[in-house]
Amino acid sequence: MSKEKWIDDIIQSGKDLSPLPVNPFLATRVEAKLHALSTERTVPVIPVRWVFTAALAMVILLLVNVVLLRTTNLSAKKNAGIQQVMQEYGWGNNDIYTMNYSK
């Protein structure tokens, strides 16, 4: 019972307070600003056709990259033997400043 009495005392103590002086136009100014913010921030809607077009373009670019990557790896494997022969015979260096003519 003492808890209920204590709660009632707290509630009754708030009734003795006088209301604070408030600007009467504050609520209307806040509402106007909130309304202005809600009308300014409209999200533009992107048509579904453009979304699918962008997704298709990304998929095509991904496939082109994968195909080019695979062909590059295959050509690198084929050229590995040729590059090894060129290095053995000294044909790989065509730079005139670093060629060794003393051999």
Image (spheres, rainbow, N blue to C red):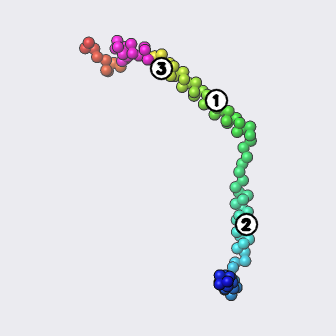
Location of the N terminus by quadrant is bottom right
Kind of residue sitting beneath label 3: Ala
Q: Residue at x 73, y 63 (%)?
A: 35
* Dot placed on the residue nearer the N-terminal end, 3 or 1: 1
Seen from the viewer's position, the closer of residues 46 and 5 is 5
Q: Amino acid at mark 2?
A: Ala
Residue 24, percent from left and from top = 72, 77
Q: Quadrant of residue 49?
A: top right
The kind of secondary structure the magenta stretch mainly shows is: helix
The magenta-colored residue range is: 80-93
| Tag 3 near tag 1, CB within 8 Å | no
Does 61 appear above or below 72?
below
Using residue 75 as the reference point, say whether residue 89 is left or right of it: left
Q: In terms of depth relative to the viewer, which is nearer, 20 or 1?
A: 1
Q: Nearer the viewer, residue 76 or 8?
A: 8
- Numbered badge on residue 60: 1
Give the labeled residue for mark 2.
Answer: 32
Name the residue rendered at 68%, 33% in the picture. Answer: 56
Residue 76 disc label: 3
Furthest-bottom residue in view?
16
